[in-house]
Image (cartoon, rainbow, N blue to C red):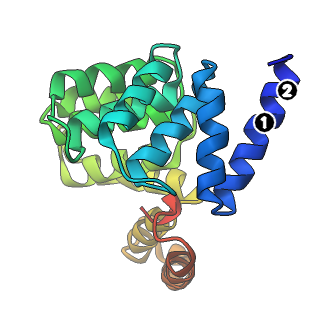
């Protein structure tokens, strides 16, 4: 490869092929780049293998490429390995490896990956540690982290139940654009958490939240705003 500009051009071409569902072409483009040691290409090549896009699904190949990218410090590869070892099909689940790779990604400081580590810890009975990672993610404005903190304080999971604090977290998640949080926030308003004057606003937010969630779901059921 001649230089970084050439890398970026070829990566952009490969991503365009993938987005336009020219899967076999994307596979060829990413394969060429991954074999040259590009970690971003290694992530996407793993993605292609795990989803069987234009080729036969091959879990061993996806793990191979994710490992190569992860060992170069690619946080998407690290996080995906964490998911694979925790929940993946056709691979022996290994919670120690899952925690290791989720932790590597989270230590980068990226709020999305801090959140994913928190989710893993919460699901595997380490709520106390998960809360600290949710808080780190939320401190950088990650909406889903605010939402989870709201749920934990609302229900008293790992912390003393505190509905006033839950209300504040739901508000912050709503301000960051999370529609699920908006519905919960609206319910608190309807229940009078900002006095009688807040009830009409709560009703409007509640109705708008459900309508917006339906629209988003029809386009993309995996959209973070409704999770």
Residue drawn at (39%, 67%), measured in percent from left and top? Answer: 184
Tag 1–tag 2 contact (CB < 8 Å)? yes
10 Å crowding of disc 2: few (<14), some (14-19), many (20+): few
- In this rendering, the answer to whether 150 lies above or below 227 is above
According to the image, label 2 marks what residue? 6
Q: Secondary structure at mark 2?
A: helix
Q: CA distance from mark 1 to mark 2?
A: 6 Å
Residue drawn at (35%, 27%), measured in percent from left and top? Answer: 102
- In this rendering, the answer to whether 216 lies above or below 172 is below
Residue 94 x, y percent position in the rendering: 15, 28
Residue 126 x, y percent position in the rendering: 16, 30
Residue 183 x, y percent position in the rendering: 44, 72
Per the rendering, the mark at residue 10 is 1
- In this rendering, the answer to whether 32 lies above or below 227 is above
Residue drawn at (27%, 31%), measured in percent from left and top? Answer: 130
Judge whether residue 138 can be spotted in this image: no
Q: Nearer the viewer, residue 189 or 70?
A: 70
């Amino acid at each position: 490869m001649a230089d970084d500009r050439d890398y970026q051009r070829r990566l952009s071409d490969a991503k365009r092929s993938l987005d336009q569902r020219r899967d076999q072409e994307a596979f060829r483009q990413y394969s060429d780049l991954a074999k040259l040691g590009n970690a971003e290409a290694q992530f996407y090549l793993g993605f292609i293998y795990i989803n069987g896009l234009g080729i036969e699904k091959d879990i061993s190949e996806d793990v191979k490429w994710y490992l190569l990218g992860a060992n170069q410090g690619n946080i998407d590869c690290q996080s995906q390995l964490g998911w694979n070892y925790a929940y993946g099909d056709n691979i022996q689940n290994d919670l120690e490896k899952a925690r290791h790779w989720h932790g590597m990604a989270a230590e980068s400081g990226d709020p999305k990956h801090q959140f994913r580590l928190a989710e893993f810890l919460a699901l595997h009975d380490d709520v106390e540690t998960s809360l600290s990672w949710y808080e780190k993610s939320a401190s950088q404005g990650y909406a889903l982290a605010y939402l989870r903190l709201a749920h934990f304080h609302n229900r008293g999971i790992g912390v003393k139940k505190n509905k006033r604090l839950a209300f504040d977290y739901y508000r912050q998640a709503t301000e960051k654009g999370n529609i699920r949080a908006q519905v919960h926030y609206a319910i608190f308003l309807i229940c009078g958490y900002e006095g009688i004057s807040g009830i009409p606003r709560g009703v409007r937010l509640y109705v708008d939240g459900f309508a917006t969630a339906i629209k988003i779901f029809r386009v993309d059921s995996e959209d973070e705003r409704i999770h």
